[in-house]
Image: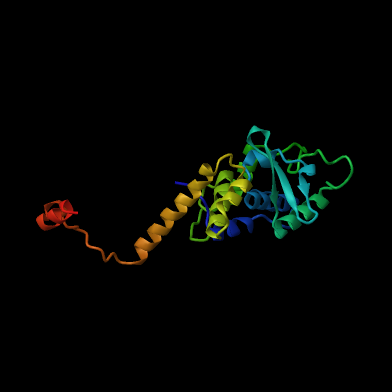
Amino acid sequence: MIQHLATEQVTFLLKQPDMQTPSGRRDVTLLSLLYDTGARVQEICDLRVRDVRLEHPALVTLTGKGRKTRHVPLLTNTANLLKAYMLENNMFQNGKQDMPLFHNQRRNALTRRGISHILKKYTVNQQNADTPPKTVTPHMLRHSKAMHLLKAGVNIVYIRDILGHASIQTTEMYARVDMETKRKVLENAYPSITPENLPEWNKDKNLLDFLKNL
């Protein structure tokens, strides 16, 4: 089972950081980029200023497993958040190209543990349909992006390229989960009209004689 969030839960999560504080603005930019790109958490940790291009079409260059790079386009809102964040932190100045895109107060690159801690801050204990579960991992945001793209009708080959999967078979797991979800929805929405007890065809002499004579 692939754990992922509904679109309403992701929306709720991204509204939690306090945009009136520098750390809140960093956090909403970080989480938006993590979701928007479907990146692995280590790929976000490794990002440098030079890996972001904000000119149209805006994109980020991610370095994944095996040091393979891929270019992932950014949605307009995420690009705008990144631009404001980078301006606030003077990242467009000469000599800043190799600094970590996301860093702590000591200007060190955020670690996997640090990003997980940030994410944990914005989950809530009071649960309803629109709030994320108590435990949300960075990888759940990656799964969520893939599922949302699939539900929106995006070609699975394109999803593979965004996620950086080496094989389309890996990406197809999202399609299998989506199909099972659809089956359960249909099963719950409509009464079953097919009979539960199917006839025992092997005991129907007339049918057996007919099949033998074909």
Tell me how many marks there are. Answer: 0
Residue 138 in percent (x, y) is at: 59, 45
Residue found farthest to the right: 94
Q: Quadrant of residue 50?
A: top right
Point 54% across, 55% down: residue: 150
Single out the residue that lies furthest toward the front. 213
- Residue 3 in view in this figure: no
The correct choice, above or below, for 182 with respect to 138 in the image is below
Depth order, front residue of 69/118:
69
Is residue 129 depicted above or below 65 in this figure?
below
Q: Nearer the viewer, residue 40 or 118?
A: 40
Asked if residue 91 lies left or right of residue 115, the reply is right
Q: In the picture provided, is 166 more to the left or to the right than 57?
A: left
Q: Residue at x 40, y 61 (%)?
A: 185
Q: Nearer the viewer, residue 167 or 125?
A: 167
Percent across and percent down for residue 103 are: 74, 41
Residue 47 falls in image quadrant: top right
